[in-house]
Amino acid sequence: MSTQLAFLVFSAVVVVAAWRVVTTPNIVRAALALMVVLGAMAPLFVLLAAEFVATIQVLVYVGAVVVLFLFGIMLTRSPMAALPTGSRYRIPGLVVAVALFAVLALSVRDAFGDQEIDVRSVGTTQAVGDTLLRTHVVAFEAASILLLAALIGSIVLARRD
Amino acid sequence: MQLAQYLTLAAILFSLGVYGVLTRRNAVMVLMAVELMLNAVNLNFLAFGAFRDTTVGQVFALFVIAIAAAEVGVGLAIVMLVHRNRHTVDLDELDEMRG
């Protein structure tokens, strides 16, 4: 019962903040609303017994990605106020988003309408580490190479010479 | 808890991300909306992982987080490069390749 309440509270925070991210005219507020979304996702991950992913979410997203976005906003000198929001794609975008949500929600209800999640202690950090470094170690190493390539690539792209 | 609750929340988040990608004119804002969509996918991975009682969902979510971090880094570098060359990040003005 209390997990249900926690789910409702945090999902309400996530939805409202995500709405702010895509609609607010102020770009810095959008970045801070994104921080709220990503931060409020972490408790939802904990409710799914994924405490390690929740920690990584806070470290990587709230700690690094949002700061990177703020740097991006400053370095591109995006207008701090009165961002042009009057996009001519507003109505088509709304139609596409609502249609997509309708399709997704209907198919979810159709396929998993009354399935219950029985959260056991599947997600202890030890179990995740075992799976990661035993079964998926090649993908793990490939991800580190990808991060190195992205690091070098963004330095090459962004440096001034 | 119901599986459909998590999947519906992820669907809402994903649709908001799609709306943001389609309507925002600033390139940095589009990248933020992409992050929303990636997080919705992560929630789905974790929900199905808990549903099937396996840790593979969490491993997948970790890979998605790592790749999203790389994507943001490279994406913002590209946006900076565009800003340096064109002095704008307004996507409606970057239309040289329109046929």
Image (cartoon, coloured by chain):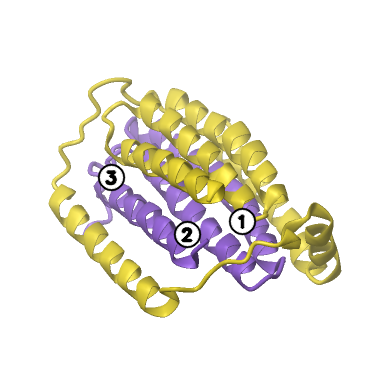
Chain colours: A yellow, B purple
The circle on residue A48 is 1
Residue B74 seen by the camera:
no
Q: Is residue A117 left or right of residue A110?
A: right
Mark 3: amino acid:
Leu
Q: Nearer the viewer, residue A107 or B92?
A: A107
Question: Helix or strand or loop: what does disc 3 sit on?
Answer: loop
Residue at image coords 56%, 37%: A65
Is residue B44 among what the camera can see?
yes
Which residue is tagged 3?
A: B94
Residue type, mark 1 in image: Leu
Q: Residue tagged by mark 2?
A: B6
Task: State whether residue A149 is above or below residue A83.
Answer: below
Furthest toward the bottom, the residue is: A111
- Residue B15: quadrant of the picture: bottom left
Instruction: Please state the horizontal and vertical placement of residue B58, each as a whole percent of the image.
Output: 67, 60
**Residue A8: percent from left, percent from top:** 44, 46
Chain for numbered disc 3 = B
Residue B7 quadrant: bottom left
